[in-house]
Amino acid sequence: MLVKKGYFGGYGGRYVPETLIPALEELDDAFRALKTDSGFQAKLRQLNADYIGRPTPLYFAEKLTAQLSGARVYLKREDLAHTGAHKINNAVGQALMAKKMGKKRLIAETGAGQHGVATATAAALFGLECEIYMGCVDAKRQSLNVFRMKLLGAKVTEVNLGSQTLKDAINEALRDWTANVSTTHYVMGTVFGPHPYPTIVREFQSIIGKEAKRQILKAEGRLPDYLIACVGGGSNAMGLFHAFLTDKSSGNPAGNIKYIGVEAGGEGINTSRHAARFAGGSTGVLQGTKSYLLQDDDGNVLGTHSVSAGLDYASVGPEHAWLHDTNAVQYTYATDTEALNAFEILARTEGIIPALESSHAVAEAIKIVPGLPKSAIVIINLSGRGDKDVEQVARILSAVV
Ligand SMILES: *Cc1c(COP(=O)(O)O)cnc(C)c1O
């Protein structure tokens, strides 16, 4: 049965088996109740401050600004959050929700391992059991993250079905959730999946934009002209954009802000090796939600590629599909080469090594900032730090020289 609920325009919804509907309803009820529960909100505020290290700074990148010689460039420093990326904001929020709902166990799927590590971290913090599903191929590629999750007390279950990667891990995690829904919360890692997940994840990530708005008003006395974020599933981008998109303050209408989402252009969108869903995709249903999707003419999901694991996925959050179609956000892409170049430039100019995912947002800034007036203000969401990527980049660069 198909139950339609939680749409963004024509996107989103709940394309799931009937057996999962009660769990999604329970989650939706709990989420609505906790949004106005002062005890929950106070605890979340305290964990955001003392555990995650929020607010993360909004850093004026003076040297990058001088080098690009255009707009003033600010970095929202999610790379300084506990565990090194924005994913922890959502993992801690959902784990606290699970605890309040009386769940004993968290499960999640992970591709590169970043969401698995964030979920295992939050499970350790709340004393919840944790099981992470990961394709065998991914587990081998990301053995350090597998060890990290185990160190944090999680059970890592390697899935040796199908392509032994993310989509097979998702199927196994969903099977587990269906069987154990009374004790178990499924932690979705991005603004994706059936309603209410895209809304829940947006809510926990929207702290990024709330802080950035306050911080830029303090630093510059006005709202920015551009917001730039990379888009995998789309959670760091929604996290930065949401508070600005919904801003109604007079004098500086948020409608004047240009929002740019940067997808993975991989080896170029004329090859089959990319993950630019808006440039190369069409409408379809995957993992319980309707959105843009890289698929062939028969609706088979296509393989994707990106130098950054976190952007390497065939679909994108449904709210982004809607923001795309309504022209509220402009979507573009950066290739692997452009992202690697941005990775090196930010390291050298600012002494900040960005995640390869975030490097896609930096790459877009490098393209547009030189053409902007000096008075313009640009905020780049630096979604994560690049420590996890240094080995991979060393391999790529040494192969190039
Ligand atoms: C996972 C990840 C992303 C991509 O996920 P979104 O949901 O699109 O934010 C981006 N940056 C970093 C550092 C990540 O770990």
Image (cartoon, grey):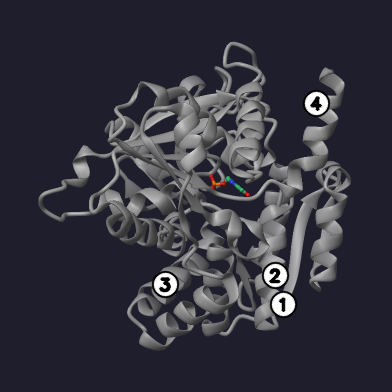
Pick the residue in front: 43 or 167. Answer: 43
Could you tell me how far apart the alpha carbons at marks 4 and 1 are, in whole angstroms?
37 Å
Q: Is mark 1 on a helix, strand or loop?
A: helix
Residue receiving disc 2 = 121
Density class for disc 4 (Cα within 10 Å; few <14, some 14-19, many ≥20) is few
Quadrant (top left/top right/bottom left/bottom right) for the C terminus? top right
Question: Which residue: 26% across, 48% down?
Answer: 223
Residue receiving disc 1 = 124
Residue 31's mark?
Answer: 3
Could you tell me how far apart the alpha carbons at marks 2 and 1 are, in whole angstroms?
5 Å
Residue receiving disc 4 = 397
Q: Position of residue 379 (x, y in %)?
A: 40, 44
Query: Which of disc 4 and disc 2 is earlier in sequence?
Result: 2
Identify the residue at the far top of this view.
270
Which quadrant of the figure has residue 332? top left
Query: Which of disc 2 and disc 3 is earlier in sequence?
Result: 3
User: Going by the image, does 150 lie left or right of 329?
Assistant: right
